[in-house]
């Protein structure tokens, strides 16, 4: 019987896929050139944590990952099912909310990163 082995095959193929994704993350050109994280740094690792089911780690790596994924999912659903009004109020609100989370988390990241440096007097 092949039926009992299907969950094992799905589990193993998921592990292989996650391992492949972790080994093929795209490098950040901004960080490569400047040495400073960009506002999007951490998104790929955060999505990887979401795929693995670790929501807390995902939020710690990149707080805007879940709202950003929801924004993209809503945008795709709106494209096919016309969910929003003619002025796109829901889409614009989600965009502003997600952008605010990105900017605030990036500001906190930079503040904590450079906050320990003291001006030499």
Image (tube, rainbow, N blue to C red):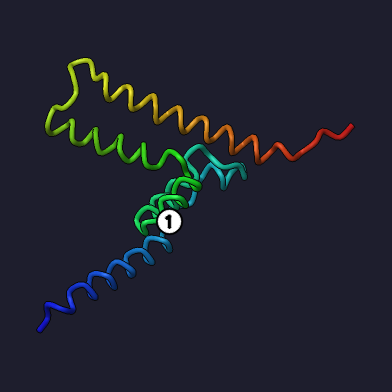
Residue lying furthest right in this view? 121
Residue at the image point whose x is 24% and y is 20% from the top:
88
Disc 1 target residue: 25
At label 1, counting other C-alpha atoms closer than 10 Å, the crowd grade (few under 14, some 14-19, many 20 or more) is few
SS under mark 1: loop
| Viewer-nearest residue: 78 or 1 | 1
Q: Quadrant of the C terminus?
A: top right
> Compared to 100, does 65 lie above or below?
below
Q: Quadrant of the N terminus?
A: bottom left
**Residue 51, horizontal then vertical, whole percent:** 34, 56
Residue at the image point whose x is 12% and y is 77% from the top:
3
Q: Is residue 23 left or right of residue 5?
A: right
Q: Quadrant of residue 98?
A: top left
Q: Is residue 17 left or right of residue 39?
A: left
**Residue 9, horizontal then vertical, whole percent:** 22, 74
> Compared to 16, does 118 lie above or below?
above
Residue at the image point whose x is 41% and y is 60% from the top:
24
Residue lying furthest bottom in this view? 1
Marks counted in the figure total: 1
Q: Is residue 8 left or right of residue 119?
A: left
Residue lying furthest left in this view? 1
Q: Is residue 90 left or right of residue 1?
A: right
**Residue 13, horizontal then vertical, whole percent:** 27, 70
Residue at the image point whose x is 18% and y is 30% from the top:
78
């Amino acid at each position: 019987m092949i039926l009992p082995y299907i969950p094992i095959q799905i589990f193993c193929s998921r592990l292989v896929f996650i391992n492949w994704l972790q080994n093929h993350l795209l490098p950040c050109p901004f960080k490569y050139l400047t040495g400073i994280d960009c506002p999007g740094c951490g998104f790929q690792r955060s999505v990887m944590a979401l795929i693995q089911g670790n929501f807390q780690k995902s939020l710690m790596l990149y707080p805007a990952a879940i709202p950003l994924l929801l924004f993209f999912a809503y945008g795709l659903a709106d494209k096919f099912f016309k969910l929003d009004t003619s002025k796109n109020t829901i889409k614009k609100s989600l965009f502003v909310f997600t952008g605010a989370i990105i900017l605030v988390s990036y500001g906190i990241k930079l503040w904590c990163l450079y906050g320990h440096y003291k001006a030499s007097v």
